[in-house]
């Protein structure tokens, strides 16, 4: 690993409600690398992203993002794509306004309609395939269309580190593939590091470099071929877990808190 790693985690541990979610976590994500984070509900996947964003305090260890401790990294080039949650129909914003929050949302007061900003918003709308609905009310857009706008917002500052929290949840297959392509294109064209939390590895499997799998306070890190095996997951869970390949898909069977298709159900506050 090089000193230029956009994300460096050393000996990290985190507790919530008196329970240790994980400890002794070491992770470096290199420029242009995509690391997927998997695990059952409550394992601490979302909390890991929050810790990187400086929203959760570690109980031990340290995190550096883009060469700075997370407490000083807030205004640096870190992009964040949240879980897909439908916006209310009455939301008084257009598609371009959502993207615009990433362009001028850091300013005090109301966003200013500057010529340079308008050009950047148009550029981002085109990049994420949202030009056609950029002027429509966001509450009338589909979940996939709204998520494209969130991707555009996250990419506004051309982030060197992109954090994605279940960005494919509730999207149909076509929109899942579209969002994955947008994330993958950004990391390849900009050499950005990506940490992507997901409950289903299949939509991103072909693009993943490494997997961090967290379960029951333990974790394992490696390539997909190293991590997604019957032996490795059985050891991680301390119980028989089987990994089956069928029709180009990975199916994990027998893992506590997981169903037969490797979907770990949780909500946004997945500890």
Image: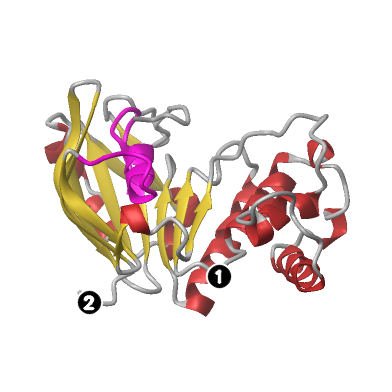
Residue 52, compared with residue 269, is above or below; it is: below
Residue 81, compared with residue 59, is above or below; it is: below
- Residue 98, horizontal then vertical, whole percent: 72, 50
Using the rendered image of the protein, determine whether residue 92 is visible from the camera's viewpoint. Answer: yes
Callout 2 environment at 10 Å: few (<14), some (14 to 19), or many (20+)?
few
Residue 234 falls in image quadrant: top left
Mark 2 secondary-structure assignment: loop
Quarter of the picture containing the C terminus is top left
Residue appearing at x 32%, y 32% in the figure = 40
Marker count (numbered): 2
Q: Which residues are magenta?
A: 37-58
Residue 208 falls in image quadrant: bottom left
- Mark 2–mark 1 Cα distance, whole angstroms, equals 21 Å
162 or 189, which is in the foreground?
A: 162
Which residue in the structure is indicated by mark 1? 158
Relative horizontal placement of residue 213, taking residue 140 as reference (left or right): left
Extreme-front residue of the structure: 109
- Residue 262, horizontal then vertical, whole percent: 39, 37
- Residue 34, horizontal then vertical, whole percent: 39, 63
Mark 1 secondary-structure assignment: loop
Relative horizontal placement of residue 163, taking residue 257 as reference (left or right): right
Which residue in the structure is indicated by mark 2? 3
51 or 151, which is in the foreground?
A: 51
């Amino acid at each position: 690993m090089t000193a230029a790693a956009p994300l460096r985690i050393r000996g990290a541990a985190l507790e919530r409600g008196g329970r240790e979610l994980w400890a002794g976590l070491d992770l470096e994500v290199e420029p242009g690398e995509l690391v997927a984070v998997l695990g059952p509900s409550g394992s601490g996947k979302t909390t890991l992203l929050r810790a990187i964003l400086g929203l959760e305090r570690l109980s031990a260890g340290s995190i550096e993002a883009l060469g700075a401790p997370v407490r000083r990294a807030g205004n640096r080039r870190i992009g964040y794509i949240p879980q897909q949650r439908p916006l209310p129909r009455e939301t008084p914003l257009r598609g371009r306004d959502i993207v615009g929050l990433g362009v001028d949302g850091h300013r005090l007061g109301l966003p200013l309609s500057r010529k340079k900003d308008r050009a950047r918003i148009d550029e981002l709308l085109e990049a994420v395939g949202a030009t056609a609905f950029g002027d429509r009310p966001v509450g009338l857009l589909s979940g996939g269309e709204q998520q494209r706008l969130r991707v555009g917002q996250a990419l506004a500052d051309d982030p060197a580190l992109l954090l994605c929290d279940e960005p494919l949840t509730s999207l149909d297959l076509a929109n899942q593939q579209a969002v994955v392509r947008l994330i993958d294109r950004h990391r390849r064209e900009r050499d950005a590091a990506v940490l992507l939390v997901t409950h289903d590895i299949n939509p991103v499997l072909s693009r993943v470099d490494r997997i961090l799998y967290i379960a029951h306070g333990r974790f394992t890190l490696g390539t997909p071929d190293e991590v997604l095996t019957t032996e490795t997951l059985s050891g991680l869970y301390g119980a028989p877990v089987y990994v089956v390949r069928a029709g180009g898909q990975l199916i994990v069977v027998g893992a506590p808190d997981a169903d037969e298709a490797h979907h770990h159900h949780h909500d946004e506050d997945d500890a």
